[in-house]
Image (spheres, helix red, strand yellow):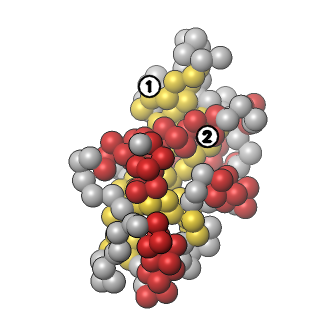
Amino acid sequence: MSFKIERFDKTKHKRTGFKCEEQSLTDYLKKQLTQDEKRNLAKGYVLVNEADETNAVLGFYTLTAFSVFLDANDLEQYQEQTTAKGFAKIPPTMQAPAVLIGRLARHIDLRGTRAGERLLMDALQAVLAVANLYAVHFVIVDAINDHANAFYKRYGFLEFGKVENRLYLPLKTIEQATA
């Protein structure tokens, strides 16, 4: 099977057969993504099989512009995790610009095929492209459960502040990985 990832188009992409392990993500793709696109709250990207003329969605992710205010504890934790790596410090009164990977899921039948990894890598490449147009300090994810939390941590995401299962990946880490 040869996959491609492209911008979501409600008139082109078939969502009815999509099912992943998290019902809320399945429902989001089928019932909410179109509304979020219309309202400019998220941009969706879908994984499809190039040979499938029905354009059945096999996975998806969303991106949203985001900013995070780091309180004193969050800022201290962030500086401890990143200063040793030579990353830039964030001023204590600044909302840090970020991109939120709001949702990411692959079809349950693709378990073990690394389709989730492919979606994540595509999302990170999209963030790099955006970072050439406007400031992005890091990527944020809100892992939906412990399994998702472990998935993101395998790719270098770090724990972040008081929001449970909120993780971040500095843009500098992505740049270094792709250099």
Q: Which residue is mark 2?
A: 117
Which numbered disc covers residue 11?
A: 1
Residue 8 horizontal/vertical position (percent): 45, 33
The secondary structure type at the circle numbered 2 is: helix
Question: Residue at horizontal 62%, vertical 30%?
Answer: 58
Residue 72 horizontal/vertical position (percent): 43, 88
Residue at the bottom extreme of this rendering: 72
Amino acid beneath label 2: Glu
User: Residue 160, located in which quarter of the rendered image?
Assistant: bottom right
Look at the picture and state if 159 lies above or below 31: below
* In-front residue for pair 68/158: 158
Label 2 to label 1, Cα distance in Å?
26 Å
Residue at the left extreme of this rendering: 133
Look at the picture and state if 15 lies above or below 162: above
Residue 139 horizontal/vertical position (percent): 45, 57
Which numbered disc covers residue 20?
A: none
